Image: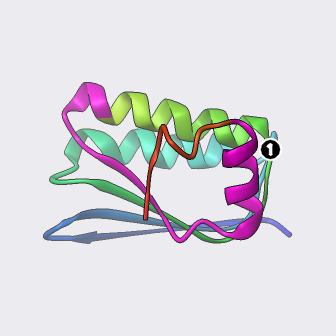
């Protein structure tokens, strides 16, 4: 399964909906979307991970880079509805307490 990324803008801030597999081959695409969205973000950047079926260390690194970049920009970075596969990886890496997860 490939990767699908949809971006929506609302008064509360941008929303990036991710579905499919976030791996070594697809994470650069997600990275590009996240880093492109952050500079113009008003409010929190929200990343919906409910449709992600698989994420590897490169995908996690992309999320960490997004968090760091958002903080440098003065924006929030929120992960919403992480799928069980994503949550398991975040917990194993002990990043579930680093990210704001809703």
Q: Residue at x 65, y 37 (%)?
A: 94
Magenta residues span: 71-93
Can residue 9 be seen here? yes
The C terminus: image quadrant: bottom left
State which quadrant residue 59 falls in. Answer: top right
Image point (64%, 32%), residue name:
61
Q: Quadrant of residue 31?
A: top right
Q: Quadrant of residue 86?
A: bottom right
Which residue was labeled with disc 1? Answer: 56
* Mark 1 element type: loop
Query: Looking at the picture, how far across and down is residue 68, in whole percent?
Result: 41, 28
Magenta highlight on residue 80:
yes
Q: Residues within 10 Å of mark 1 (few under 14, many from 20)?
A: some
Task: Choose between 66 and 94: the one closer to the eye.
Answer: 94
Locate residue 43 relative to residue 49 in the image: left or right: left
Can residue 53 be seen here? The reply is no
Image point (57%, 46%), residue name: 96
Residue drawn at x 48%, y 37% is: 98
Q: Nearer the viewer, residue 89 or 20?
A: 89
Q: Is residue 6 above or below residue 66?
A: below
Horizontally, residue 102 falls left or right of residue 82, namely left
């Amino acid at each position: 399964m490939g990767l699908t990324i949809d971006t929506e803008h609302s008064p509360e801030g941008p929303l990036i909906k991710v579905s499919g597999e976030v791996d070594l081959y697809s994470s650069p695409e997600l990275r590009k979307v996240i880093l492109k969205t952050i500079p113009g973000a008003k409010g929190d950047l929200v990343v919906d991970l409910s449709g992600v079926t698989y994420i590897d260390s490169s995908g996690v690194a992309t999320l960490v880079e997004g968090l760091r970049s958002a903080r440098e920009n003065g924006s929030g970075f929120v992960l919403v509805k992480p799928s069980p596969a994503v949550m398991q990886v975040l917990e194993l890496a002990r990043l579930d307490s680093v990210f704001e997860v809703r």
